[in-house]
Image (spheres, grey):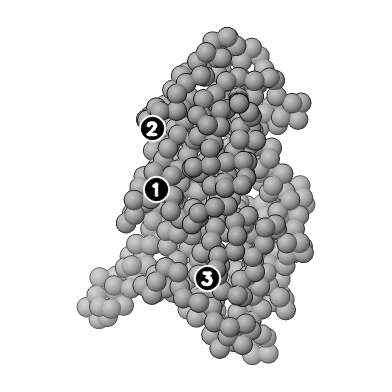
């Protein structure tokens, strides 16, 4: 039975046996910046230290990872914090952190990208003693997650520190609409086959969001009857060019897994019909981000995701799926990831209204470079004077280069929303 995309997506991803709440987690199906290199966590640790300084080094510093997968980011952050601050102090606060999930070589890459630890104050507790790490995810807590990382199925309140959401918003379920006859109508989907049909007109609230954030591109092209017949299409179509300005996401280096990226392929079973303009209604993402920002008492909320701006919305939409390291049609039956790019300007506006403070929006490339991760290659002279150091520095540069590649992960958006602190340190790109 056909239903709206928002409902189908919610059940497929988060319902009983859903894609994100069962199995081994998303790492078997796609790679994010977190999975690509521990250098990403190394840069975020620098950001954690900046937030700590902006807060005046509080007794408790929260780091909350929303959409945490299986806790990969927080595991690596804990390891790096212990290594760069005071390993003994961390052990005293709750036991061993656990091994670096990316392996020893990855730890070296992250350490190299992070640089030397910042100076401390003698009478201040080390950062690692004050860190409180919380993973937010609907899946069960992994058996091997270190005890010092808390696990929750909802965002905790009264956060003082950093809230980070890496490729979370793109998986917040949303409705899809098509423009015809002078108005927007919901698209319905059969959860078992992915076949679409046209439903009723969108609600007044969704119509208002579309009028504000997703303008109709050009004149209408077809009548409602044309749309009904054209949208009933098989999901067996293969991934191909859509003419929407997007292209297939490149395979992640060193892995068969696809990196979900901002210019990623928006292939869906319906994208090649040239019918009415499609829109992905981001009102649910706005609400999700606003609620996340609302949970921060003082600190910074950071969203990292692929998305688009009002002046450059994709005519054919971006809905797609991932399974087993490959991009697939988005059939919402629970067997694959179902994702759509984020209307990042709309999300940013929603968070700003809650925080009552300006936000900063830029690319991941800009964000990582501002944190000292520029991917610069070491001088060749180092190879002669310190061969081992040269190899380590070259590995660090290669890892950061992937994270900052503007055609891939570097093209992701970084949305920084300060709450209750001086925004100036987080505005620079």
Secondary structure beneath disc 3? Answer: loop
* Depth check, front residue: 408 or 145: 145
Q: Could you tell me residue 422's position as x and y percent? A: 71, 63
Q: Residue at x 31, y 68 (%)?
A: 394
Mark 1, Cα crowd under 10 Å, few <14 / some 14-19 / many 20+, is: some
Task: Give the foreground label among 1 and 3.
Answer: 3
Mark 3, Cα crowd under 10 Å, few <14 / some 14-19 / many 20+, is: few
Secondary structure beneath disc 2? Answer: loop
Q: Is residue 405 above or below residue 42?
A: above
**Residue labelled with disc 1:** 325
**For marks 1 and 2 on the same chain, the one whose residue lies earlier in the sequence:** 2
* Depth check, front residue: 216 or 424: 216
Mark 2, Cα crowd under 10 Å, few <14 / some 14-19 / many 20+, is: some
**For marks 3 and 2 on the same chain, the one whose residue lies earlier in the sequence:** 3
**Residue labelled with disc 3:** 144
Cα–Cα gap, marks 3 and 2:
37 Å
Q: Could you tell me residue 306's position as x and y percent? A: 52, 45
Q: Residue at x 70, y 64 (%)?
A: 299
Q: Which mark is residue 239?
A: 2
Secondary structure beneath disc 1? Answer: loop
- From the image, which quarter does the N terminus lie in? top right
């Amino acid at each position: 039975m056909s239903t709206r995309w928002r409902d189908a997506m919610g059940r497929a991803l988060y319902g009983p046996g859903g894609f994100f709440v069962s199995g081994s987690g998303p790492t078997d199906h796609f790679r994010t910046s977190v999975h690509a290199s521990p250098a990403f966590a190394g840069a975020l640790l620098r950001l954690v230290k900046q937030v700590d300084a902006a807060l005046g080094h509080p007794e408790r510093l929260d780091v909350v990872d929303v959409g945490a997968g299986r806790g990969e980011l927080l595991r690596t952050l804990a390891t790096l914090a212990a290594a760069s601050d005071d390993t003994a102090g961390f052990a005293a606060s709750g036991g061993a952190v656990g091994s670096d999930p990316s392996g020893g070589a990855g730890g070296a890459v992250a350490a190299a990208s992070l640089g030397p630890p910042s100076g401390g104050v003698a009478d201040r507790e080390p950062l690692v003693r004050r860190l409180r790490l919380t993973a937010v995810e609907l899946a069960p807590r992994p058996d091997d997650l270190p005890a010092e990382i808390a696990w929750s199925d909802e965002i905790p309140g009264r956060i003082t520190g950093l809230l980070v959401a890496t490729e979370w918003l793109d998986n917040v379920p949303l409705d899809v609409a098509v423009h015809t006859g002078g108005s927007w109508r919901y698209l319905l989907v059969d959860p078992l086959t992915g076949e679409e049909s046209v439903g009723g007109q969108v609600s007044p609230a969704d119509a208002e969001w579309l009028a504000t954030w997703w303008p109709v591109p050009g004149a209408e092209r077809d009548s409602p009857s044309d749309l009904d017949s054209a949208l009933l299409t098989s999901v067996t179509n293969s991934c191909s060019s859509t003419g929407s300005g997007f292209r297939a996401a490149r395979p992640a280096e060193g892995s068969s897994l696809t990196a979900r990226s901002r210019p990623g392929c928006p292939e869906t079973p319906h994208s090649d019909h040239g019918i009415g303009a499609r829109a992905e209604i981001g009102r649910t993402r706005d609400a999700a981000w606003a609620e996340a920002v609302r949970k921060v008492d003082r600190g910074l909320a950071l969203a990292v995701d692929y998305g688009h701006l009002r002046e450059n919305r994709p005519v054919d939409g971006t809905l797609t799926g991932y399974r087993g390291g490959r991009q697939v049609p988005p059939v919402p039956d629970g067997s694959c990831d179902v994702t759509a790019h984020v209307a990042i300007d709309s999300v940013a506006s929603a968070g700003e209204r809650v925080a009552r403070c300006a936000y900063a929006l830029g690319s991941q490339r800009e964000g990582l470079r501002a944190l000292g991760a520029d991917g610069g290659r070491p001088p060749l002279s180092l190879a002669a004077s310190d061969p081992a150091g040269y190899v380590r520095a070259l590995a660090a540069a290669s890892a950061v280069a992937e994270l900052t590649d503007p055609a891939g992960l570097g093209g992701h958006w970084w949305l920084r929303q300060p709450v209750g602190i001086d925004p100036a340190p987080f505005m620079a790109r």
